[in-house]
Image (cartoon, rainbow, N blue to C red):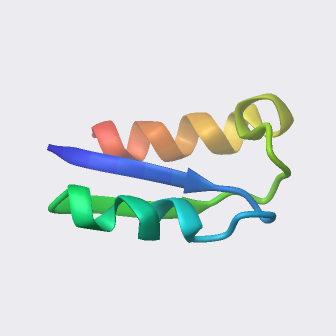
Amino acid sequence: MPVLAIGSTASGTATAQALTPHAENIQGAVAPTGHFVAEEDPAWFTQTVTALLA
């Protein structure tokens, strides 16, 4: 099952690194935002999630 780990400019790739031992198919992405990714840049969030689901 693919897992999308989204971090922000504050956390970077820490989310993806933390989930790596628990998933075989993990994709990490770093949003150009602060902590509230979906609220701060909904277009980026939608595009990133849509790409994973495609």
Write the residue at 46% across / 39% down.
49
Q: Quadrant of residue 54?
A: top left
Q: Is residue 43 left or right of residue 27?
A: right
Give the answer, above or below, for where 47 lies relative to 12: above
Write the residue at 79% across / 37% down.
36
Q: Quadrant of residue 40?
A: top right
Write the residue at 82% across / 53% down.
33
Measured as percent of width and height from the top left, residue 18 is found at 43, 63
Write the residue at 39% across / 46% down.
51
Give the answer, above or below, for where 51 lies relative to 13: above
Measured as percent of width and height from the top left, residue 29 is found at 53, 61
Q: Is residue 33 left or right of residue 3?
A: right
Q: Along the line of sight, which residue is nearer the eye, 37 or 41? A: 37
Give the answer, above or below, for where 33 lies relative to 54: below
What is the quadrant of the N terminus in the image? top left
Q: Quadrant of residue 20?
A: bottom left
Q: Is residue 44 left or right of residue 14?
A: right
How many numbered circles are shown? 0
Measured as percent of width and height from the top left, residue 38 is found at 71, 32
Q: Along the line of sight, which residue is nearer the eye, 34 or 41? A: 34
